[in-house]
Image: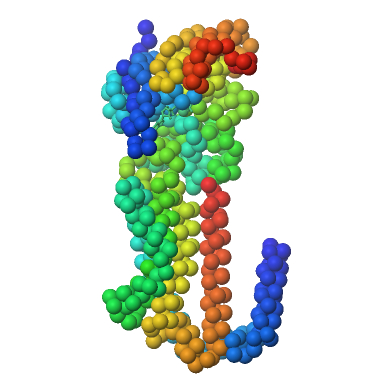
Amino acid sequence: MIRRALEVFLFLAALTALWQLLYLVSGDVALSSPRDTAIAAMELLIAESFWRHVRETFSAFGYALFIAAGGGLALGLGLGLHRLSGAVAEPILVSLYSLPKITLYPLILLVFGLGMSAKVAFGALHGIVPVTLFCMNAVRTVNPAYLKTGRIMRVSRGAMVFTIVLPAALPEVFSGLRVCFSLTLLGVLIGEMFASQRGLGFLIMNAVGLHDVRTVMAITLLLAAFAVCANSVLLMADLRLHRRV
Amino acid sequence: MMRIHAELQGVTRVYPATPTHSAVHALGPVDLALGRGEFFSVVGPSGCGKSTLLEVLAGLAQPTAGSITFESATIQGAVPDGVGVVFQDDASFPWLNVRENVAFGLKRARLPAAEVRERVEYALSFMGLDDFALAYPAQLSGGMRQRVCIARTLVTQPRLILLDEPFGALDQQTRLLMGDELLRVWRETGATVLLITHALDEAAMLSDRVGVMSARPGRIIEVVKTGWSRDRDSRLASDAQFGNITSRLWRVLREESLKGLGRTGTPPRKQETI
Ligand SMILES: Nc1ncnc2c1ncn2[C@@H]1O[C@H](COP(=O)(O)OP(=O)(O)OP(=O)(O)O)[C@@H](O)[C@H]1O
Ligand SMILES: [Mg+2]
């Protein structure tokens, strides 16, 4: 445990050193120094207006995550259980997964208009595909011996989904949810960058427009810290689930 | 005259053709009658349709032709009450601990909670799993996981127990001991047991009768009666009769196994051991 903490600390120290070096090479125009950035981040954290933007971003993220995870689970489960529709949908989903979704953003803006719903839709669009794909594959590849056991125990089809298929698929589904989490956040932020008057994405773009390198980097730093923390918690849970198999 | 508990008449199973494979005639026609309380083993070359036989008998798969009766009712591709199966592949649920695994089959049975607890605890101690009740299958050895599966089957108190190579993954010593445990289950529950195995000595030691299957499509070409008493155990292995039965099984099976390998009655270059 102490070793692990030491490793993390050394890694962060190395990263900061690299950052300082890059700053010395490139100068004030492109980067702000680690020290300046940390101060800027502190300033942001105590500013009332910053938290308004945070709330805006995270409520959009919450809705988007809910839609992506819930929709993806339902869709993946359905497609996994029904072979033919799964076979039809899979190539479509895979190409959607690899498509740069920014190309669809104008379309989304047309449909949803500027504002909250467009961000939510764009975030959900990023997140829903991986959950669906992971969930579909997990359901399809559930060990047939588990299903036979259920039939021998005379478990009804409906109960089989909840007592066998989903628990068996859970580790894979959770991996999908982990990817979903990151991509949905990405989607919401990109959405805010290009068509929004509020939120962290907007704040970054605004600062870029003002050549306020410090603020850009401070927000990026805070977002990165959040993403890394959230992801490591999810990754830990993920590994735990996979160890049971 | 034995009372018939389960019976297959002219049962065949053909796996239908798929876009990538042609149809596979996996089984039969098979005629087989299991007596009530009998211990019957099936041996046969690999891929001859043993698992298919079990699935059809359990009502997990529909026969292509023929009929199956269990306790005088016809099985029509639906699992009847009173049948328990231990599968060839490890089927313990990794997301449940040992106790939850064992209790799984009783969740939907409308039994009083005390009765459920009692049956689960009994099955756990019977299979020597008390100390592992809270462990997850990933923490157990293959043999113990298979014991979990047997315990999970036992709690439902099946009258017909079907086991598909349950000890296939175990070493010889453990296999013999597990065989003893299986005999104990059989004696104490009075259930009818159908055991599928590839180990001739196991079949010869445990069974009242042993059916030998042909290469695919599997038919039962010979049934060997052992004549053991009901309270037998693995010490039989030193009995002279044991050797006789094993070698008789091998004589029949050798021919079929060669066919299964795509060769016919030519003497093998390498001496094969039993
Ligand atoms: N779902 C399936 N679709 C098509 N063919 C199948 C299917 N399941 C089994 N078979 C074929 O049917 C034949 C019998 O299979 P089965 O699993 O019953 O044999 P087995 O005697 O249990 O084999 P083993 O000794 O390896 O356990 C095999 O040739 C197998 O390839
Ligand atoms: Mg088999």
Question: Looking at the picture, how far across and down is residue B96, in whole percent?
Answer: 49, 46
- For the N terminus of chain B, give its image quadrant: top left
Closer-to-camera residue (B90/A105): A105
* Residue at image location 45% in from the left, 42% down from the top: A143
- Left or right, residue B46 beside residue A24: left
Q: Is residue A175 above or below residue B165?
A: below
Identified at 35% across, 58% down, the residue is: A92
Residue displayed at 56% across by 88% down: A213
For the C terminus of chain B, give its image quadrant. Answer: top right
Name above or below for residue A114 compared with residue B233. below
Q: Quadrant of residue A199?
A: bottom left
**Residue B233 image position (x, y, % from top left):** 57, 17
Q: Position of residue A101 (x, y in %)?
A: 40, 70
Q: Residue B10 in the image: x percent, y percent?
A: 31, 17
Query: What residue lies at 41% left-to-right and 15% top-to-bottom?
Result: B220
Q: Is residue B88 visible?
A: yes
Q: Is residue B240 above or below residue A161?
A: above
